[in-house]
Amino acid sequence: MDEIVLLTSLAVFLLLAGVCSIVFNKIKLPPLVGYLFAGIIVANIWDVSEDSQTVVEILSDMGLIMLMFCIGLEINLKKIRKQGVLAMKVALVEIPFMVLFGAIFGSILGLDSLQSLCLGAVMAGSSTAVVLGVLRMQNRLEKDRIDTLILVIIMEDIAQVIILSMITPMMAGGAMDPGALAAMIVSIIAFMVVSIFLGIRFMPRIINWIADSVSSEVVVIFTVGLAFGMALLASYVGLSVAIGAFLMGMMVASSRKSRDITHDIEPMKNIFMAMFFISVGMEIRLTTLMDNLTLTLCLLVIFVVLKLIAVFLGYWFANETPKNSFTSAISFLVMGEFAFIIAKQALDYEVFSEGVYTSIVGAALLSMVLLPLISQNADGRWDAVAKRIPEKLMNMFKALDGAKTSFYSMLSDSSRRTRKEVNANITMVYILLVMITIIEIFFMLATQTIIQWGMTYFGGDLIIWSILVLLLNFFVLYVPTIRLFIRVKTMLIMANGFKNMLTSEHGLITHIFMSNAWIMAMMLDITLIIIVPNGLELWEHIVVLFIALVILLIYNLKSVRARTEMVTVFEDDDTYDVDLDEFIELMNRKYEENLERATAHKTVSIDTGDIPHDKE
């Protein structure tokens, strides 16, 4: 390659990126937006030669490795384990929600199963740089809430890395062979487990020993070399180079010198990262963007609505107030750096068309531009939203919020054993939700493959196998959903909020919702099977759901006549089952006994105006 071409390309790209970043800095937008617009300008004005394109691709790959390495350096697993309880609760609700519903809406927009899954992965994360920049500019959240928000975004990054590692072989064409897919999953898990556990255990010690023996510049050179070496190793096992660099960053993050390393490589990272985002922008043609403007706006609206709901639910389930949940959620409404990374990988593997890729990047850019406007005066926006919600719906939400508050209050005042039992129930509820998500994603990706496999090896026509696969999907899904509703009902009763909800104006709906778990499980199954894409016709779904309904009615008819729903009671070292009415009566009786016992052990004396209470 001619050195003049290299120098010319670097000079033009970096100077243009710098000028664009200066312009966007004037309107309080991060440099990332300037880099992307520089790439768009280059692609639409300058006829880039083949040699210049080669320069961009090489520097872009280096930029991706450096970017992922630095993101990994920001993730200290020890800090997450000590301080990230609330953030983990939020992320555990938000991330599966975004992936699943992002994939569902992708199918509604006409994408196939793999494209829809990639879209869900794209939408799962937010941008740390943009969010922090906006929060610093607006200065509207306390430091503790900002720290929690950053930890949530870090967990989004980790989740997106895991998702990217799983879908990369699928994008490369390995998803159709079940044996190859299983081998790929095992190799990915083995690679990541070995890398994380051995790396985090030994790599910090190696870095600390080197840092104590040599100068800081040698440490920087050594760690950057490790990042590129780990990226190369990841490519050998069939993963993206980005994942290897990210894992090495996590290993180095636990060393004493991680902050110094991050500071020293910052200038180098900024240069190569700029080239990566310039290359992302160079894939966008203005004519293509205008042709897909409707899709771009649809993706933006879908992302904003889903993200707002997902983060709100995450904070709310973690016992934040509705107002705090909303004001925190509104800070997440910007697509992250991983949106560009995953979208670029999908484009390179020809999973995304140029139009879909352009629409995703365009929606991400619009979210970055709009976040300062959307998040401004977040408290006032919550008041406005609360006023527009219908009164009956708002009362129902207040009843749910009261039950949630009662549940957490009961949990904080209960014994250690009760808290342990409740936490076990919550953990099982989350596991069941994850199982439901995994089952539907599996059937979304594998329905057509299973149908073709069955027709090839066992015969039969397409309609028969479509119905059989849908029935299989329904009954596999029914197992975790029925257990899910029974677990949720038990926790609501334990919180003593269930009786109050039964006596509210929405008591009938709540009673149906919680007393007939099999009906609710069936309704959830029906909803998921209809909305999750699988390539089958609507009439096939109707036939299968009618068959499933008949089977479930016959199966549950005897049990409905014979008994009510049973609830497991833990008392001393024994467990036993009671029906729902007996359980509510038992809870009320125990509450009255505890109240009488507490009152009997209180003594009041008046000596100096104080009123001491002797607690039992």
Image (tube, helix red, strand yellow):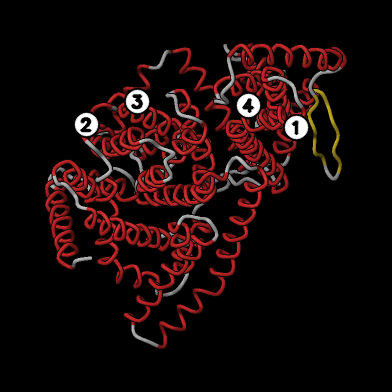
- Mark 4 residue type: Gly
Would residue 297 be found to the left or right of residue 237 on screen?
left
Q: What residue is disc 2 on?
A: 287
Which-is-in-front pick, marks 2 and 3?
2
Q: Which mark is residue 497?
A: 4
Kindly identify the amino acid type of the residue bearing the numbered disc 1.
Tyr
| Alpha-carbon span between mark 4 and mark 2 | 57 Å
Q: Earlier in the sequence, mark 2 or mark 3?
A: 2
Rendered residue at 69%/49% (across/down): 416
What amino acid type should be assigned to the residue bearing mark 2? Thr
Q: Residue at x 58, y 43 (%)?
A: 606
In the image, residue 556 above or below residue 146: above
Nearest to N terminus: mark 4 or mark 2: 2
Of badges 4 and 3, the one in the foreground is: 3
N-terminal of the two: label 2 or label 1? 2
Residue 58, by quadrant, is bottom left
Question: Tag 3 or tag 1, which sits nearer the N-term?
Answer: 3
Q: CA distance from mark 2 to mark 3?
A: 18 Å
> Which residue is label 1 attached to?
457
Which residue in the structure is indicated by mark 3? 298
Q: Which amino acid type is marked by label 3?
A: Cys
Total numbered circles: 4
